[in-house]
Amino acid sequence: MVLGAIGLALALSACQPVPDDATLAELAAARGRRIGTAVEPSHVANPDTAAFIADEFSIVTAENVMKFGPIHPERDRYDFAPADAIVDAAVANGQQVRGHALVWHRQNPTWLDEAWTRDEAIAVLEDHITTVVTRYRERVVQWDVVNEAIDDTGAMRDTFWLRTIGPDYVALAFEFARAADPDVALYYNDYLIERAGPKADRVAQLVDDLIAAGVPIDGVGYQMHVLVPELMPSANALRHEFERYATRGLRVAITEMDVAHILPSTPEKFAAQADAYDNAIMACLAVPACDTIVFWGWSDADSWIDAEFPGFGNALLFDRSGEPKIAYERIRGVLWWNLQPPAA
Ligand code: 9MR
């Protein structure tokens, strides 16, 4: 009888609407997850925006300023000030920081365009990773060590690093990062791995090879730049993808999520967008190893998609006037009601 009353009380509380003042950070924390956004220094320099980010999110990623070119513009000069602004603000607000990204094929400085020998390129890689990771020790909790090393066909991407060092640049990068910070969680990060296919399989093989070789990798980041309706897997399919890495003992993060559609927007497209976010959060909640969810910005007025994919967009949780969209309300609902994991 007593148990029945407790059960009823729990069931009733579970039916309560999401408290109006509950932030994403609070709702996610109740589910053991951190939730966040990409940020630029201009965001934390603006008091209103900074206060909004501090309230709503528990983790931030530097959208650009920790990448190789911006943070290491000349061989003997690092420019830490923009990244410091983001990290300092996050620490002051009690937020965590994802470091993004130590090795990538884009946003590299022009000084890397020289003809390097393999040994010289390894020395450059080691200096860069050691310097940047050491600077943010104990403040950055997760690093995207290698970003997008596999191309869309499932081959090793043809990059400066592959050409000058060879495929083991990936393992070297993880080893240099671990040597610089024994505690930070080290991730391989990529897009289009949320869908089963050659790219997802090849990334899993790369990760397996790293594990087999004893390379210090802690997790895999699913960027999740999604296009609806075409490119969104079901919550169940996504859960299976996340479990690939959970069963290998790794952590999983959603690292750059946004859900675009072809413009103009319609209520149906926004509904499909809300479904996609819902699927992703459900899948993450169903896999204990998935402990981090980061969106690639929050406002449709301020997203990389407008510049890189004109004709697509409105992919984030708040519209161009700053009003929350249904996707935002759906995410709050999924976090609050903690719906059952999708069926196997
Ligand atoms: O959002 C970033 C945008 O401001 C930059 O111009 C762009 C340059 O390549 O990089 C964007 O972020 C990318 C991220 O670092 C890696 N995954 C894909 C993201 C969107 O292109």
Image: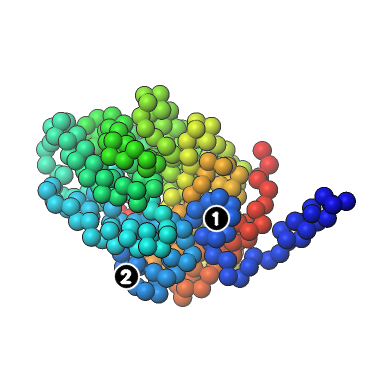
Q: Secondary structure at mark 1?
A: helix
Is residue 146 at least partly visible in the picture? no
Q: Is residue 291 visible?
A: yes
Q: Which residue sits at x=39%, y=46%?
A: 142
Q: Secondary structure at mark 2?
A: helix
Q: Is residue 79 above or below residue 246?
A: below
* Classed neighbour count for the residue bearing mark 1: other residues with Cα under 10 Å, few (<14), some (14–19), many (≥20): some
Closer to the N terminus: mark 1 or mark 2?
1
- Judging depth in this view, the residue of 187 and 343 nearest the camera is 187
Which residue is depicted at the point 67% across and 52% down?
A: 339
Q: Which residue is mark 2?
A: 45
Query: How many numbered callouts?
Result: 2
**Quarter the C terminus occupies:** top right
Left or right: residue 86 versus residue 211 is left
Residue 285 in the image, given as x and y percentages of width and height: 59, 48
Q: Position of residue 247 (x, y in %)?
A: 53, 32
Picture quadrant where residue 5 is located:
bottom right
Q: Is mark 2 within 8 Å of ligand 1?
A: no
Outermost residue, right direction?
1
Q: Is the distance from the Cβ of mark 1 to the nearest ligand 1 atom less than 8 Å?
A: no
Q: Mark number for residue 29?
A: 1
Residue 95: which quarter of the image?
bottom left
**Is residue 64 placed above or below 289 in the rendered structure?**
below
Going by the numbered disc 1, the residue's amino acid type is: Ala
Please state which of residues 142 and 172 is positioned toward the viewer in this rendering: 142
Q: Viewed as shown, does residue 21 lie left or right of 173?
A: right
Q: Which mark is residue 106?
A: none
Amino acid type shown at disc 2: Ala
